Image (cartoon, rainbow, N blue to C red):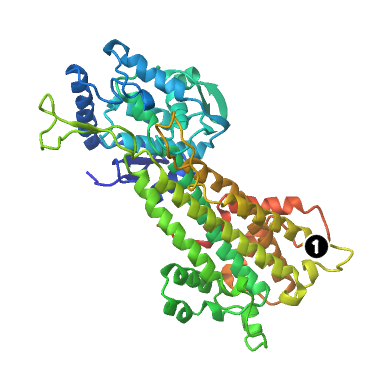
Amino acid sequence: MSQTSFFTKQDGVQKLTLVPGTLTLEQLREVHRNHIHLSLVESAIPAINAAEQVVLNVIEENRTVYGINTGFGLLANTRIDADELELLQRSIVLSHAAGTGDFMQEDTVRLLMLLKINSLARGFSGIRLSVIEALITLFNAQVYPAIPEKGSVGASGDLAPLAHMSVVLLGEGEAFYKGERISAAKALEIAGMRPIALAPKEGLALLNGTQASTAFALQGLFYTENALHSAIGIGALTVEAALGSRVPFDPRIHEVRGHKSQCDVATAFRALLDTSEIGNSHQRCEKVQDPYSLRCQPQVMGACLQQMRYAQDILVTEANGVSDNPLVFVESSDGSNVSEATAGDILSGGNFHAETVAMAADMLAIALSEIGALSERRMSLMIDTHLSGLPPFLVENGGVNSGFMIAQVTCAALASENKTLAHPASIDSLPTSANQEDHVSMATFAARRLRDIFDNVAGILAIEWLAACQGLDFRKPLTTSEKLQELMQLLRKQVPFYDKDRYFAPDIEKAKQLIKHYALMDKIQLNLLG
């Protein structure tokens, strides 16, 4: 048996065998991008069953334990009678499904469900195997619960989002199937399931956890990865179009400073720029130095990559962690195991507090915004004939034609908006649950807003890509490197040369969609994250 989760392919279907706690970034990225079939490795089952037995022992011995036979939050000291325990778990799920706003995207929900299954299957939650299997069945049927994006503060778990995921198991709420919004009853029918009744602790185990925050943050990491890779390709095109120097990418410059991420970005630029007719044409020019937006790309985007790698380590750890509460430990502190009637410890702590996710998301927000800010400066350089040596606003017959004038204004607007969006969310906190939960992380918003920042950055990069290709067309018959010619051709298949003013918005949108759907990133073929 493999000790780590692994992919196989059967009949054209990508299948992931989950070994709880061993998901990799590559596997998480694949689940975000595509539908996959999920199965749980058999070796995980004994730990799940053993933790369930610890919970059953509490009920049989009539002990009082938080989350099993008490109320929740400020009501933790309220004892619940045995004949109301099933109602208690059902009630917490229904009452906590109090989210609002737009529904999460399908790819976000897919990640969230995988993370929840991964956490529960570790065997520290006291939940029945059948409940985990029910989530896997929904996942494999591509029946995704309708989960509002707003309503979690990222502490005491992502309660509202996870409640909306869980109510579908009870036959309540709504779901999406093949893009159609349907009732939970219809969703269960499609998946070949019936509503389930929750046993003690199961409602709380489903609701407590950082899976919504972490799913949003992982998605944001993948967005930032896309933006960085795309920006390196587009930035290299701009270096060529503006007749920029290759000297700033010399490995000796970066090695003496010593930051690995900076060195890695510089290496990527050298590979893309390679040898070209354009590069050879100005080797002995009189220009001494380029503006920082060209010259300092390895330093700035290397710093962004450092933060991405930092976030990657945190988020992959969190994706494999157990973050509900209380936690069930089959082996007691004295070393006895579940075979003894009173064995096992159920401990209340705070793993549901998503501060680490919030701070990682905040750093991603800053990195993503800086990628966009640097792109806007390069694009601005391109339309300035004194800096680029190209026609003003990158169009012939200027005056009659405005060319890229207002496209740069759009870049400025998007970059400025990101300055506000990138303000750290983790430094905010509002007490909840009658001050029982008196410090919260705001991780869910910290991570969710990464999508909005990325959308802005994709727009900025799209405009720079158009501008760089326009500039390179003006450099003909000289050509750029073979690899950069491929990036030009990718765009030119969709957007022709801007010979005179035309309805500009469709050009920008076509370039933006190529970026957002990974066409540019996949063409560049860098691998700067794991």
The quadrant of the image that shows the C terminus is: bottom left
Label 1: which secondary element: loop
Where is residue 203 shown, x and y percent of the image? 36, 24
- Residue found at x 62% / y 61%: 373
Q: Is residue 512 left or right of residue 305?
A: right
Q: Residue at x 66, y 59 (%)?
A: 491
- Whether residue 199 sits left or right of residue 369 in the image: it is left
How many C-alpha atoms fall within 10 Å of the one at disc 1: few (<14), some, or many (≥20)?
Answer: many
Q: Is residue 55 above or below residue 441?
A: above
Query: Residue 158 location, x and y as percent?
Result: 44, 35
Q: Closer to the camera, 488 or 204?
A: 204
Residue 406, position as x, y percentages in the image: 78, 58
Q: Residue furthest top?
A: 83
Q: Closest to the observer: 328 or 387? A: 328
Q: How many marks?
A: 1
Answer yes or no: is residue 467 visible. yes
The quarter of the image holding the N terminus is top left
* Residue denoted by label 1: 403
Q: Would you place residue 432 above or below residue 301 in this image?
A: above
Whether residue 528 can be seen here: no
Task: Reply above or below: 354 against 524.
Answer: above
Instruction: Give the quarter of the image for residue 87.
Output: top left
Q: Position of residue 250 (x, y in %)?
A: 50, 80
Disc 1 marks a residue whose amino acid type is Gly
